[in-house]
């Protein structure tokens, strides 16, 4: 009887705390007449969501979703029936104005993405800038983030790190991104998808040379995977989303870009034969000899 009694008391305390928290959220929504809540959602496991996030989503007037169909899975799981509207990168400018209009009508709104924290490589930045410009209130309901989880899972140094988002498909922007990644003295985090993962790994190799990376996928799911490899590397039959964590070793040599490699190779060819010159660059920058050879042959054809 003593064990049953203790369990009953413990359950009553939990239920009492949940009720108190729900009342706190209701009061918060009531007194903050206009408020935008930027709510983090699970990145895989549906249980990775806070009590506060659930109550905000349940008690607010409107939920702005990156994809209403995708978010319905989460909302149905927690029996949340709040009205939803679309807010994605293709309608971000117009939808931001619409959300601000709703806020001015006294509506409390939650902003969510398909997974993780909105704004971080997801829609939301445009809206936040407009809120700041108009001196309107917003707050964050924290939670899961794929980049930080991948950093921890990689085992790489987390003392100093930087997040670079998705690599651009535009050559000029990509070149600038890769240059920033190369010059950052710390662990680097990059997002990728099944459509771009091998191209992204190739671009990172062309910039950084033979360097260790952790290719992390299915975070918090049953088949969570941390694949630590040395570039160059490619994935057979990519699936889903990926986080690439790039190791930083303080004493590693900074690799020049392809144009700089070719320029240095041509200089060496004035004094050495092709095989010796390529071997010297291989040892200097940790670049495979075959990569230098292919780069050189390609340059001769253009």
Image: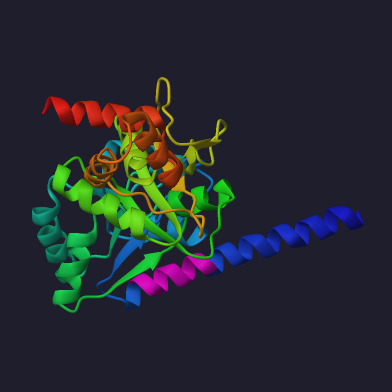
Residue 290: % across, % down = 37, 27
Viewed as shown, does residue 86 lie left or right of 110?
Answer: left
- Location of the C terminus by quadrant is top left
In this rendering, the answer to whether 267 lies above or below 128 is above
Residue 274 sits inside the magenta stretch: no
Residue drawn at point x = 31 percent, y = 76 percent: 32
What x and y, as percent, mark residue 56? 39, 61
Look at the picture and state if 65 lies above or below 294. Answer: below
Kindly report the secondary structure that dominates the magenta region of the rendered protein: helix
Residue at x 44% of width, y 51% of height: 147
Asked whether residue 220 is in view, the answer is yes
Out of 98 and 171, give the one closest to the viewer: 171
Pick the front one: 129 or 13: 129
- Kindly identify the residue that appears in the image at 40 percent across and 20 percent down: 237
Q: Nearer the viewer, residue 136 or 186?
A: 186
> Picture coordinates of residue 247 (x, y %)?
49, 50
- Please indicate, yes or no, whether residue 122 appears anywhere in the rendered image: no
The boundaries of the magenta stretch are: 21-29
The residue closer to the viewer here, 183 or 145, is 183
Give the percent coordinates (x, y) of residue 20: 55, 69
């Amino acid at each position: 009887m003593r064990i049953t009694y203790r369990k009953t008391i413990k359950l009553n305390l939990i239920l009492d705390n949940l009720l108190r928290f729900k009342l706190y959220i209701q009061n918060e929504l009531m007194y903050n007449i206009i408020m935008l809540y930027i709510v983090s959602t699970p990145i895989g496991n549906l249980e990775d969501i806070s009590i506060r996030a659930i109550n905000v989503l349940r008690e607010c007037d409107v939920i702005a979703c990156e994809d209403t169909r995708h978010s319905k899975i989460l909302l149905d799981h927690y029996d949340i029936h709040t009205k939803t509207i679309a807010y994605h990168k293709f309608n971000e400018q117009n939808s931001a104005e619409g959300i601000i209009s709703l806020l001015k009508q006294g509506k409390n709104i939650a902003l969510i993405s398909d997974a993780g924290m909105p704004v971080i490589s997801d829609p939301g930045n445009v809206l936040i800038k407009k809120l700041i410009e108009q001196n309107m209130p917003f707050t964050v309901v924290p939670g899961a983030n794929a980049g930080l989880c991948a950093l921890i899972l990689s085992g790489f140094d987390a003392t100093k790190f930087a997040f670079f988002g998705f690599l651009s498909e535009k050559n000029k922007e990509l070149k600038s991104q890769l240059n920033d990644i190369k010059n950052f003295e710390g662990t680097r985090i990059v997002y990728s998808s099944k459509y771009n993962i091998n191209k992204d790994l190739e671009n990172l190799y062309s910039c950084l040379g033979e360097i260790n990376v952790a290719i992390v996928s299915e975070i918090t799911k049953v088949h969570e995977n941390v694949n630590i490899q040395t570039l160059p590397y490619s994935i057979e039959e990519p699936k889903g989303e990926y986080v690439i964590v790039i190791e930083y070793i303080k004493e590693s040599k900074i690799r020049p870009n392809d144009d700089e490699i070719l320029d240095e190779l041509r200089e060496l060819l004035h004094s050495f034969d092709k095989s010796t010159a390529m071997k010297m660059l291989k040892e200097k920058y940790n670049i495979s000899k075959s990569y230098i050879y292919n780069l050189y042959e390609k340059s001769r054809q253009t």
